[in-house]
Amino acid sequence: MRKYAFVGILALVFLSSPRDSRRAIAEDVHRDYSALKQALLDGKDIHTLIDLSMCQVHGTDKSGPPVRGVSHFEGYMIQADGTIAFARTHFAVRPDKTPVNEFLSYRLSASGKVEHHTIFLNAVTFAVLHEAEFDCEIGKGVAFHW
């Protein structure tokens, strides 16, 4: 349980900001792959809503940690098979004062399945401190707004 608290604390620090939260409430939430793909191709500014508790720990039927927030990704790639991939790196400091780089990556398939992968790297040595993977779906753990 301790490792989920660590993931939750760090993810919440980077995912949530008052400005983004207000925008999320004010804008329509889109839960459709086709609409997202078109919005990306149209150059829309996309924000991602995440609730890891509605996702599954990869390879299990166990729910993810109680972490919710909003994030903005500056770059997306739509691959030949239709998969939409996006990632973000965030610098943070753990409760034990260790500086870390948090790397988040998402892969969204045309079926609406979302693979969420988080890696925490020591900011000095780049050693992997923690890794977590979650399986989500559009409308169940992940939504998008623009």
Image (cartoon, rainbow, N blue to C red):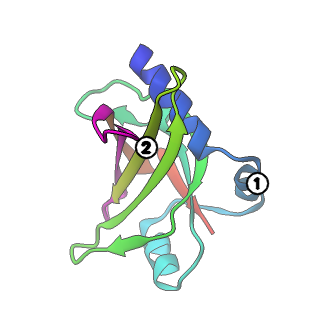
Q: Main secondary structure of the magenta part?
A: strand
Q: Residue at x 43, y 23 (%)?
A: 4
Tell me the tag on residue 19. 1
Which quadrant holds the C terminus? bottom right
Residue 94 within the magenta-colored segment of the rendering: no
Residue positioned 44% across, 38% down in the render: 100
- In the image, 118 versus 135, the foreground residue is 118
In the rendered image, residue 8, in percent from the top left (x then y), is placed at 51, 29
Q: Nearer the viewer, residue 10 or 21?
A: 10
The answer to whether mark 1 and mark 2 are in CB contact below 8 A is no
Residue 15 location, quadrant? top right
Name the amino acid type tagged 1: Arg
Mark 1 or mark 2, earlier in chain: 1
- Tell me where residue 64 sits by quadrant: top left
Give the SS element for disc 1.
helix
Residue 120 in percent (x, y) is at 37, 37
- Label 2, secondary structure: give it: strand
Q: Residues within 10 Å of mark 2 (few under 14, many from 20)?
A: many
Q: Answer with left or right where residue 23 lies relative to residue 74.
A: right
Query: Eyeballing the image, is 48 above or below 16?
Result: below
User: What's the magenta region?
Assistant: 108-130
At 33% from the left and 75% from the top, the residue drawn is 78
Is residue 112 covered in magenta?
yes
Q: Mark 1 to mark 2: distance in Å? A: 21 Å
Query: For mark 2, what is the residue?
Result: 102
Judge whether 116 appears above or below 47 on screen: above
Location of residue 124 in the rendering, given as x and y in whole percent from the top left corner: 38, 40
The residue mark sitting in front, 1 or 2, is 2
Quadrant (top left/top right/bottom left/bottom right) for the N terminus: top left
- Looking at the image, residue 17 sits to the left or right of residue 126; the answer is right
Residue pictured at 44% horizontal, 56% vertical = 88
